[in-house]
Image (cartoon, rainbow, N blue to C red):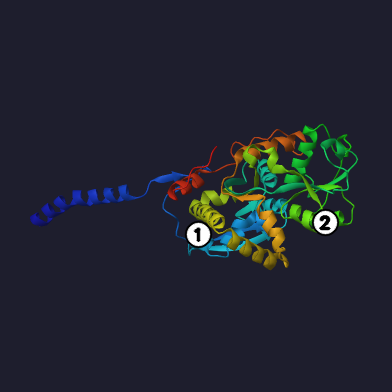
């Protein structure tokens, strides 16, 4: 008995040391950009990621990466991707508010609206997707050669308060012009892009400020000409057209999945830029599968030249867009976007992949 007691006394400190050593080997807690403290080790529990996107070339990353295996590879076998396609940004925000989508590729103004409407609680921008790709196309017979020629003319935008509508109205204001409803003489008509093309072909419109590929379609299918490429209005020609948002709740609960999604976006962006012809073919095939009609090759080739596929969210342009929306009366109060970005995961992915950091 004495020998047994002595043995227990000798082994007890060793047990304590081993137990302490085990605690020290656990990975340290990490704090996400959304403010939640989580384990740095990825959660291995299965989860479904409900991911939204549009059947549009400015949403090339999901169109390519969901179909060539990059997204599945980076998210891993424990993540089931449930794809959700949308036609407009406001519908994405409604779905996010209703808890029906966890992440989505989306345009800047709907993201701004969703962030402000939720008091800064509902969403975070975690990566970029596309820069550029908006054209102001006019009828060559309209006599529009300079800004003042727009007075009395009928100009279309895709939707009241959408990204291109805000850009058009802000540009009019900067050039001493204005829409009729705000006391100006330019007849700005929010019209769906497909209807804009038909009306342009019928000679019912003098011009339209639209995203790609509709700008190129107005040129190739309706005889329009470029009056202004919006890239000319931004520093270095860069401005956000599409970026990736996530539900704040999902980011807090599954930062490991968001990391996989961001990494998939980065890797797909690199693949697209290294394989543009293959990427265009895959994008067009997915557009056809979703919408029922592929783009003519001449359209996708020309439109592709007007966009830049990038994981940089180009934050400075988002701030300017929000200021324009406020000045136009689309936002009730001056926007505070200080918390809309959660780019720590993107920064870590870029460093891990040996890619240059994005500029702030």
Residue designated by label 1: 75
Residue 205 coordinates in the image, percent (x, y): 87, 50
Q: Residues within 10 Å of mark 1 (few under 14, many from 20)?
A: many
The disc label shown at residue 25, or none: none
Which quadrant does the C terminus fall into? top right
The answer to whether residue 45 is above or below residue 158 is below
Residue located 66% across and 54% down the image? 304
Which quadrant does the N terminus fall into? bottom left
Residue 24 coordinates in the image, percent (x, y): 31, 47
Residue designated by label 2: 222
Lateral position of residue 146 relative to residue 108, left or right: right
Residue 77 coordinates in the image, percent (x, y): 48, 65
Q: Is residue 141 visible?
A: yes
Lateral position of residue 161 relative to residue 129, left or right: right
Q: Is residue 162 visible?
A: no
Residue located 65% across and 57% down the image? 53
């Amino acid at each position: 008995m004495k020998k047994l007691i002595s043995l227990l006394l000798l082994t007890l400190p060793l047990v304590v040391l081993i137990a302490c050593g085990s605690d020290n080997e656990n990975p340290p807690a990490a704090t996400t950009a959304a403010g939640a403290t989580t384990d740095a080790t990825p959660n291995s529990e299965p989860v479904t990621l409900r991911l939204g996107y549009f059947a549009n070339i400015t949403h090339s990353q999901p169109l390519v990466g969901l179909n060539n295996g990059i997204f599945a590879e980076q998210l891993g076998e424990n993540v089931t991707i449930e794809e959700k396609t949308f036609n407009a940004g406001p519908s994405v925000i409604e779905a996010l508010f209703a808890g029906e989508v966890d992440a989505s590729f989306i345009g800047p103004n709907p993201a701004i609206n969703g962030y402000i409407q939720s008091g800064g609680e509902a969403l975070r921008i975690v990566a970029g997707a596309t820069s550029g790709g908006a054209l102001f196309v006019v009828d060559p017979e309209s006599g529009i050669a300079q800004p003042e020629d727009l007075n009395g003319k009928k100009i279309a935008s895709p939707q009241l308060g959408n990204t291109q509508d805000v850009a058009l109205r802000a540009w009019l204001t900067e050039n001493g012009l204005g829409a009729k409803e705000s006391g100006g003489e330019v007849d700005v008509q929010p019209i769906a892009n497909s209807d804009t093309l038909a009306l342009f072909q019928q000679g019912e419109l003098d011009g339209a400020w639209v995203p790609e590929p509709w700008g190129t379609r107005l040129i190739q299918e309706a005889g329009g000409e470029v009056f202004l490429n919006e890239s000319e209005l931004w520093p270095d020609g860069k401005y956000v057209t599409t970026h990736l948002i996530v539900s704040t709740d999902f980011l807090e609960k599954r930062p490991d999945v968001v990391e996989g999604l961001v990494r998939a976006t980065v890797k797909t962006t690199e693949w697209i830029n290294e394989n543009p012809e293959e990427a265009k073919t895959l994008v067009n095939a997915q557009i056809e599968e979703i919408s029922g009609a592929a783009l003519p090759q001449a359209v996708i080739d020309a439109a592709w030249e007007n966009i830049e596929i990038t994981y940089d969210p180009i934050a400075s342009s988002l701030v300017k867009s929000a200021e324009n929306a406020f000045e136009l009366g689309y936002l009730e109060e001056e926007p505070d976007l200080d918390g809309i970005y959660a780019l720590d995961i993107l920064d870590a992915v870029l460093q891990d992949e040996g890619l240059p950091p994005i500029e702030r």
